[in-house]
Image: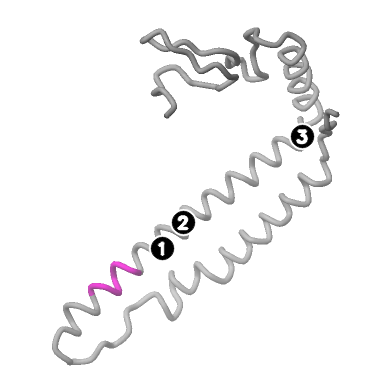
Amino acid sequence: MAQERVFDPEAVEEYRQFLLGLLDQLEGQVIPVLATGTLSRAPAFGTAPGAADGAAGQYQEFHAATWRNLQYLRGTLHGMESALAEISGSGAEADDEAMLAFAATEATPGSTGSTADGSATGTVLFEDGSETGDSALIDEGSSRPS
């Protein structure tokens, strides 16, 4: 029995609000500590042998990597939130379009169809004459799946 899939705008909005909460926490509590707070400068490592060179250098590398990762995370969360906001605005229409495309390819097994974004589905032929035999989506220029 086929399971019916329905677009749930309330679930999308709930997840978007969750992401906004994570962004607020990241931008309000975590990033300021690394930018201007207690972790913005290296601790005093003293005058022990290797302290100035080894520990200070390791701390600077750690701080730079952590800062870079937090900025990547921040950008990812903003991108996800933006995509969810766009989806919630046009979600019902996109869901209907996807369901029609899926129903069309399901109605004629073995035929080649297309998805909502225009990409092809069906059997994919490779240069060596072999094929995938399934409905794998493969972009032009991508290598053969292993």
Q: Which residue, given by chain and number where applicable, does mark 1 sit on?
A: 67
Q: In terms of secondary structure, where does tag 3 sit?
A: helix
Q: Main secondary structure of the magenta part?
A: helix
Mark found first going from the N terminus, 1 or 3:
1
Q: Position of residue 106 (x, y in %)?
A: 74, 16
Q: Quadrant of the C terminus?
A: top left
29 part of magenta stretch:
no
Quadrant hosting residue 133: top right
Q: How busy is the neighbourhood of tag 1: few (under 14 within 10 Å), some, or many (20 plus)?
A: some
Above or below 145: residue 108: above
Above or below 71: residue 30: below
The amino acid marked with disc number 2 is: Gln
Q: In this rendering, would 4 be left or right of 65?
A: right
Q: In terms of secondary structure, where does tag 1 sit?
A: helix
Q: Which mark is residue 76?
A: none
Contact flag, marks 2 and 3 (Cβ < 8 Å): no
Residue ID at (66%, 54%):
19
Q: Which residue, given by chain and number where applicable, does mark 3 sit on?
A: 89
Residue ID at (85%, 29%):
1
The amino acid marked with disc number 3 is: Gly
Give the Cα separation between the discs numbered 1 and 3.
33 Å
Q: Position of residue 140 (x, y in %)?
A: 44, 17
Above or below 128: residue 3: below
Give the Cα separation between the discs numbered 2 and 3.
27 Å
Q: Position of residue 145 (x, y in %)?
A: 44, 26
Q: In this rendering, would 140 be left or right of 46?
A: right
What are the residue bounds of the magenta stretch? Answer: 57-62
Residue ID at (39%, 23%):
143
Q: Which mark is residue 71?
A: 2
Contact flag, marks 1 and 2 (Cβ < 8 Å): yes
